[in-house]
Image (cartoon, grey):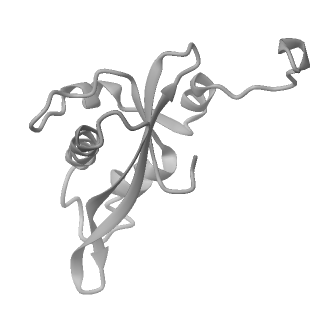
Amino acid sequence: MFDATDLIHAYSRADALADGQLIDVSEQAATVHGGVTGFKVPVAMTIGAWHALVAWDADAKPHGAQLSEEQRLKDALLVALESAARDYGSSYVEFIVDVLEPAESGLVVEPKHVVMTIGPGDNHEPVITIMLPGED
C-alpha cells in the first residue's frame, strides 16, 4: 500500500541513541552474569528507565551515593537477564527491580516495574530495550 517514497520521517534506534533518549548499555550487559551468561545482543535503556533504576544524583538525594551508578546498573541488568532466562522465547518480559531510594526516614527499597522487549533493530538485527511500562 505504501512504499519508501511515501515516508515523511523515520526515527531510528540510532537516532534515539544519538539524541540520548536511549542509553547503550551493551558492554555492561554482555558482562553481567548470574546463573547464565550475559546478554548476547545490543541492549539499551530508555532515559526514563535509566533515571528510575540507575541514576543517583548525590546533590538531589541527600543520603549520598549508597551504590555507584555502575553497581545500580549491574543490579538492574542482572534482574533483567534472570527475567529473560525465566521467560525464554518471549519478546516482551515484565519484571521488578528493587531500587534503593531516599525517604524522610532514611533509605528505602522501592520496587520499580520494568519492561524489556527484544525486536528488530534498524537493520533487522535483534536488539533489547529496557524501559518503564508505557514507554513503548
Residue 97 left/right relative to 7: left
| Front in this rendered view, residue 31 or 36 | 36
At a point 43% along the width and 36% down the height, the residue shown is 91
Residue at the farthest bottom position: 105
Q: For this rendering, which residue is in front, 78 or 61?
A: 78
Location of residue 125 in the rendering, given as x and y in whole percent from the top left corner: 48, 16
86 on left or right of 89: left
12 with respect to 47 (left or right):
right
Question: Measuring 31% from the left and 59% from the top, which residue is drawn there?
Answer: 96
The part of the image, by quadrant, that contains residue 4 is top right
* Residue 7 screen position, x and y as percent: 85, 21
Image location of residue 62, percent across then percent down: 30, 71
Question: On screen, 134 above or below 123?
Answer: below
Vertical relation: 82 (above or below) 123: below
Q: In this view, does 66 lie to the left or right of 102?
A: left
Vertically, is 18 above or below 21? above
Q: Position of residue 19 (x, y in %)?
A: 61, 33
At horizontal 29% and vertical 21% (from top left) the residue drawn is 40
- The quadrant of the image that shows the N terminus is top right
